[in-house]
Amino acid sequence: MPGSLTTDIAGGRGAPPSTPGFGDGDSGGRGASRRASFTGLLVLLAASIMMFAAFTSAFFVRRGLSDDWVSTPMPRVLWLNTSVLLVSSAVIEMARRVLRSGHRVAFNRLWTAGTILGALFLCGQYLAWRELNAQGFYLATNPSSSFFFLLTCVHAIHLLGGITALGYVDVQALRLRLGPGKRTAVDVSAAFWHFLDAVWIFLMLLFVFWG
Amino acid sequence: MALAAVIWVLTIAICYVFFGHYWWFPPPISQHGQDYDAQFNATLWVTGIIFFLAQFALGWVIFTYRDRGRPARYTHGNNMLEALWTTATALLFIGLMLTGSRIWAAVHFDGPPPDSMRIEVLSKQFAWSFRYAGPDGKFGRTDIKLINDQGGNPFGIDDKDPAGKDDITSASIKVPAGKPILLILKSRDVIHNFFVRELRLKQDLVPGMEIPFPFTADQTGTYEVACSELCGLGHHQMRTTLEVMTEADFNKWKLEQAAQK
Amino acid sequence: MSSSIVHAAHQAPTGFIRRYIFSLDHKVIGIQYYFLALFSVFLGMGLSVLMRYHMVYPDAKVSWFEKLWPTGAAGGIMTPELYLSLMTMHGTIMVFFVLTTAPQSGFGNYFLPIQIGAEDMAFPVLNMLSFWTTFLALCVMVAAFFVPGGAPLAGWTVYPPLSAVGPLAGPGEGLGQSLWIISIAIFSGASLMGAINFIATTIDLRAKGMTMMRLPLTCWAWLVTAILGLLGFAVLLAAGILLLLDRMAETSFFIPAGLVVSDQILNHKGGSPLLWQHLFWFFGHPEVYIAILPGMGVASQLLSTFARKPVFGYRAMVYAILSIGFLGFFVWGHHMFMSGMSPYSAMAFATLTMAIGVPSAIKTFNWIGTLWGGRIRFTSAMMFAMGFVSLFVTGGISGIFLGQPALDLYFHDTYFVVGHFHMIMGVAAIFGMFAGTFYWFPKVTGRLMNETLGKIHFYLTFIGVYCIFTPMHWLGIAGNPRRYADFTNFDFMGKLMPVHTFMTWAAIITASAQLIFLFNLFWSMKKGAVATDNPWDATTLEWGIPSPPPFDNFAGHHPVVNHGPYEYGVPGGAKDYLMQSDPP
């Protein structure tokens, strides 16, 4: 039966009606659906990693053979953004922990805070783009700035997806609809959020050392 | 059952045409061409035998094991056989690859002999140009702003550079027989490909790159050069010729060209 | 989640739209994909017949060409640029919307959940989205025909700079090319969604007792194909974005400095055309296996069923699929031997390419081993499966030539290559689809397809494709380059025209023979003989449920699997086979 990867949360098909099997003999209620959600998430992450890997290899190839590479200055707000995103991730993780010990109100507060921090990061990214534009760096200025805008944009699009997932959980939580079945949604969206964090740190390293 | 017959007939027909050489390579005009043909023939024999045996076996099992009321054999396989044919194919394939690598190495790794004659090849949609250094042996400076196809300057050779004064450009390529040639392949717009059947050689011309490409042609004659990488709507018209001449004819041609400048 | 919703999700929706258009049912989605591919394959085939006609009769005036393409075929004579755009669209539609769509998304969607004993895919909404995204991609692709300048002409591999510098490089390189890239990006997204579903479903929703080593080989093939699609399409999506930026945002990822196109100096700097080729073929080579692996799975399943014998070397088959999937990611460079890539890396790619030939050979041996000692029933489905093996051998063996960089020095971009990949990823894969259609049709519709029509169609197609594609190898040996709109400009090609003429007429006849299949398909839906639940005496789970299957596949019952997938010819019982769900 259906698991609950982000879109399927929204689609709202139910948890399995009875024990579906798990091929290797293990079976247990919601188990298969929950497992499928995590498998789905891992698979999604694999695709995402491949995409960033493709961009990164293009980055290094393009950097290696060009004489037109001019380093893009790092807007200072990026460092602020990085810390906002890291804090956001930590807060989401704390929320997940307190939920496990049953503190729903604390969970709601923390989760909402984490989601808002995520949105703040996006605003900060917008500021960073504006700052670069003001200094005369646009998408097509030179390969370094091309990759900067491209990678931050692709990351931001991923992040929009992540915020949608966090927001969905948040709305459900605030409406007190966070039954045990939705715990999967909490865990999956939190894991995706941490992944975006890791991608961002990777991108920062890329920009700082090779950008 | 008819299927077995169809498979056999097709197999025999295909083998017949392949080994009858009805549509075949033109004769090679270089040592590389002869080596190439030897490697091709070795591969053709190996694959031809595999092809024939596999198709024949397929037809044979279809014919023999059609449903005639006797029960099927209940077996899940045979690991010995699996190991055997895995090893056999692996050895065969890698072996072919190794014998072929010698030819690849001769083209790409060995490096051109130092006395090679350098010729620049420039491709554009949809024409070829070739440039020979004059008696000074040096190519003149070029600038894309000076490109003038109508004025006979597809390379954009800079007149102010003395090294370029004696450069000869030509719309077809002429080479002396037996002399090692080193082509410098360049493209002006999109990717093209330099292909001469008789040389058994082919190489892309990639804009932004200068690709060295050596060959030696031994047999005099005129051979067609066909663009072999899709380059736009005139791709099928992008033709020139390779003329392999005697050393004397070649020198005469060069002198004539120089005089016309 | 309240129990009433759980219950509601378990019933077939009643409204027409929820049931047939925006359905969440994997079976309906599978059929939607199948029909999308069926439309595409006839479109793609139609384009190829026009191309073949033009190559042989380049000056022919055909009045309706002008009606279809007022500029591309002004006066009824097809221009070279129209030929190239037909070729580009033929390749693209066939590769993406037929070979990627039908065997995996079509058959896989319908039968993967049933064969593993699940009630649906893991993420039904995602599944529906994936289909409609694919549909959108097809619409955008077909729209490229109708924009100013027409469809792109850069081939399905869209090598920059030709594909990147805009209309300067030729008609069709304007909006048409942009739509092409956008369509492929959308398609990549759809494929990623599909892959997520296939992988999660196979790993987590298998019925009790359905261990990985009891999976039917079809499921193994779909799983590995999904993994290939996942990793490949992610990279293609990235590459497509870069190319689109080069075209629309003046970046220079793939466009080098100093280009002079149509006498205009371009303002780009320092990009690398080879970078595109690396990214594209990193996707493109696994794509070949995306097309053929499901066909291999279907062939294995059918050969075993109709020879009444277990698959010879089931484990070896699984390992072969896995190693093909794994090695498939390390051989992309063999498409680039002549590209100016380092000749040393060519040697590495060549060695790996030869290595990937080994598991393919193992599969062939095992198929013949499966037939050996069997009791073959000659149904149309089986004919196509055996035809698949023959075509797979023929198509695979020419790869031994092309995989050697030394021999590729001559064969690169000749008709030898065209013959090779049409044989193996084109018609062999399509024979897998025909076989699957005849085999599963009774399960989907409850009726059998007509066997007489099926066999006539089989023989015409089987002989037809050999007549079309084998001569391509001879043309290749004679040095005929591919992607030529006509062959009038070169002396040596004149001698080859009889071969071209023969191929063109073979193509016209073979294409017409496909109408028999189309007729059979639709006629049998209404008038075919009524099928039992298990007309082929087959063992896998789909044959243990009614035809057509109920909404949740197993009607609330959860199958338990006790046997391997191919227990045929089992001695000592009343019937000669054990179904997977039979008691131990």
Image (tube, rainbow, N blue to C red):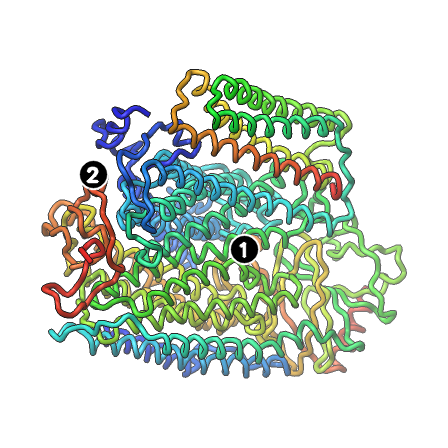
Q: Nearer the viewer, residue C3 or C359?
A: C3
Amino acid residing under circle 2? Gly
Residue C50, percent from left and from top: 38, 54
Amino acid residing under circle 1? Trp
Task: Give left or right: position of C365 versus B252.
Answer: left
Circle nearer the N terminus (1, 2): 1
- Are callouts 1 and 2 both on one chain? yes
Please name the residue shown 51% across and 52% down the image: C283
Residue C230, percent from left and from top: 47, 47
Q: Nearer the viewer, residue A182 or C29?
A: A182
Tell me the quarter of the image containing the C terminus of chain A: top right
- Which chain is indicated by disc 1? C
Please name the residue shown 41% across and 48% down the image: C93
Q: Nearer the viewer, residue B127 or C427?
A: C427
* Mark 2 Cα-neighbour bin, 10 Å: few <14, some 14–19, many ≥20: few
Mark 1 or 2: the one toward you:
2
Q: Is residue C70 visible?
A: no
Residue A152, percent from left and from top: 64, 34
Circle 2 SS class: loop
- Which chain is indicated by disc 2? C
C174 is higher (above) or lower (below) than A132? below
Task: Give left or right: position of C355 versus C261.
Answer: left
- Disc 1 marks which residue? C281
